[in-house]
Amino acid sequence: MTTTVSTPLDVIILAAGKGTRLQSQLPKVLHPLFEQPLLRYVVDAAVPLSPHRIIVVVGHDKERVTEAVEAMATDYPSINFVTVTQEPQQGTGHAVQCVAKAVPDLSPTALLLSGDVPLVTTPDLATLLSAHQQGGHAVTVMGADVPTPTGYGRLLTSQGNLTAIVEEKDASDDERRITQVNAGLYALDTQKTLPLLANLSNSNAQGEWYITDVVALSLQANHTVGSAMLADWHSMQGVNNRADLARCMASLNERHVNAHMANGVTVVSPASTFIGPNVAIGADTMIYPGCFLAGHTTIGPKCTIGPNTRLTHAAIGQKTTITESVITDSAVGDNALVGPFAHIRNGAVLGNQVRLGNFVEVKNTTVGDNTNAAHLAYLGDATVGQQVNIGAGTIIANYDPVRKQKHPTTVGDGAMVGCNSVLVAPVQVGDNACVAAGSVITQPVSDNALAVARAKGKEIPHWVTRQQKAPSQTA
Ligand code: UD1
Ligand code: CA
């Protein structure tokens, strides 16, 4: 979605706080939902508004937060990312004072966002901006009516108009009963509001300079203020502690699951299914309970996934079934059967109609169409052809512990590798070759040959009878 704003827009994101209540060594805005930091969600929501700059206020552990901002900036080369340091962190109003000092040429319109309000959407921000611009306000506050207002700043109103924001810790009992709260997202007319920042005070319960006081200050200066109320309050959930993180995860997940169901995916148990932001799923695919689908993952139509399956950066074809398995950074073709209890990883590529069964691990290996490894096998750093049968217990011994390196193995089309064989890499098994069960293969096997590499069996007649007649060894 691209939304054009009539005036140049700067976006300011507050991300300097420690997040004390998370009890963590990781700065709050870098805590992940799925694999993305909270801050990334806020940036992603702002980018489609085509801001001139995204200014991130950093402070606590600023090196790590700045590094994360730089990583995000590489994904959006057309946007100018700027970091401003706030040291020490003396409140959200103080953070904006630091921005005003460090960036004297702020655009006339700025969106002020919180790095810990990750579920806000681009349409929410567009609504905030248009309410702001239509009203010509000094500041427009995004708010919502929430079922549990605890922890949020309350919106004080007179005849339906916003008059001030009072923080929970400064609120009277009556004010705490108000359920209309501040989302921590604002649109600012910088020319009207920045001069008022000098009048902020820290005589409040937390001894901090609050940006929320800019509402009352604007009215005192005879400017108008506005509010934009969210239809769905879930978008404004803030993260202050681990319980908030879990709630945001649940809301975000619900959003993703609902979108997939609307596109024709059956999700048998939405509450026990986790689907990340970058997952694409084809219609008529069934997702059974206990699945965690994350990273850049694509699943074709008419697949059956789960129960209890984890896919991360996986590409799955169509009509494929994956049960109780883990697939990471790998691809599986069409009409394949994987699991139960298979582990596919590190760039493995499985063809169409492949069947990988119980306790089979495939790492950095290409497996051709119609190949089976139905039970208990390890295929590592190999190229396995089409219509190959890998017997139960086959191991590719790919690691050379002396040179500390992995060696490659190839298994030709139509080959049959008998049960409990070890293919010691580097080694090649030819097309249509056969490896006898229990062999340890260290030499290349030619096309169409049988390789037997095991001790010859022998029979000892009457051994059991002799044992039975022998005097007991134990006294
Ligand atoms: C803030 C609002 C509250 C609102 C809530 C919404 C204030 C005073 N209160 O409260 O009205 O309901 O957000 O989620 O603004 N930060 C800095 N520098 C600082 C302090 C904070 O950059 O000195 C950043 C934090 O990293 C965070 C954001 O500002 O990303 C909000 O700060 P936080 O302390 O979480 O404010 P709340 O108490 O949640
Ligand atoms: Ca917060």
Image: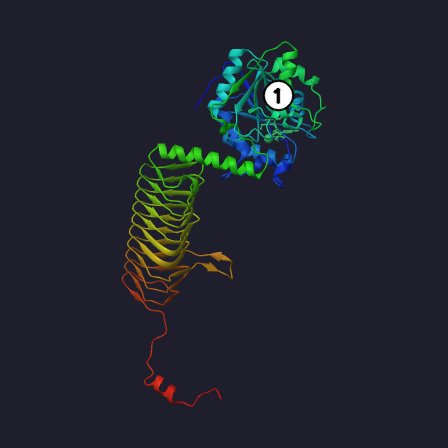
Secondary-structure class at tag 1: strand
Residue 268 location, x and y as percent? 36, 41
The three-letter amino acid code for the residue at tag 1 is Ile
Viewer-proximal residue among 200 and 87: 200
Name the quarter showing ligand 2.
top right
Query: Is residue 187 shown left or right of residue 326?
Result: right
Viewer-proximal residue among 55 and 267: 267
Viewer-proximal residue among 135 and 53: 135
Count of numbered labels shown in the rendering: 1
Residue 460 location, x and y as percent? 34, 83
The quadrant holding residue 397 is: bottom left
Query: Is residue 338 shown left or right of residue 109?
Result: left
Viewer-proximal residue among 379 and 308: 308
Q: Quadrant of the N terminus?
A: top left
Above/below status of 123 relative to 396: above
Q: Is the CB of the residue bearing disc 1 within 8 angstroms of ligand 1?
A: yes
Residue 308 location, x and y as percent? 41, 48
**What residue is rendered at 52% in x and 21% in y?**
51
**What residue is rendered at 51% in x and 36% in y?**
247
Q: Residues within 10 Å of mark 1 (few under 14, many from 20)?
A: many
**What residue is rendered at 38% in x and 59% in y?**
377
